[in-house]
Image (cartoon, grey):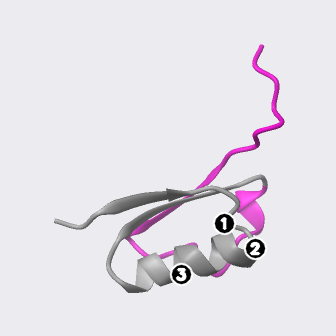
Amino acid sequence: MAQTILITGASSGIGKITARHFRENGWNVIATMRSPEKEEDLSGPDNVLVTRLDVTDVPR
């Protein structure tokens, strides 16, 4: 059974590199970012979920 990792800030820099590393090593990756609709590198594989997360959003 594959391990799962949650990565925040996966749209660039160390977050994106980390997401790629775990994806390539068979992990399930939950890659969060402010604008997931712009993501092209991580979208597609079955073991990657790209979703929106913005820590500056104020709950209502």
Q: Residue 27: percent from the left, percent from the top?
A: 35, 71
Cα distance in 3D space between marks 2 and 1 = 6 Å
Against 49, is 41 above or below?
below
Q: Residue 33: percent from the left, percent from the top?
A: 71, 56
The image quadrant of residue 41 is: bottom right
Q: Nearer the viewer, residue 37 or 31?
A: 31
Q: Which of the two labelled residues, at mark 3 and mark 1, occupies the earlier sequence position? A: 1
* Few, some or many residues within 10 Å of mark 2 (<14, 14–19, 20+): few
- Position of residue 26 in the picture relative to residue 48 (left or right): left
Q: Residue 18: percent from the left, percent from the top?
A: 56, 76
Going by the numbered disc 2, the residue's amino acid type is Ser
What is the span of residues highlighted in magenta in the rendered image?
35-60
Q: Residue 3: percent from the left, percent from the top?
A: 28, 63
* Few, some or many residues within 10 Å of mark 1 (<14, 14–19, 20+): many
The image quadrant of residue 2 is: bottom left
Image disc number at residue 20: 3
Image disc number at residue 12: 2
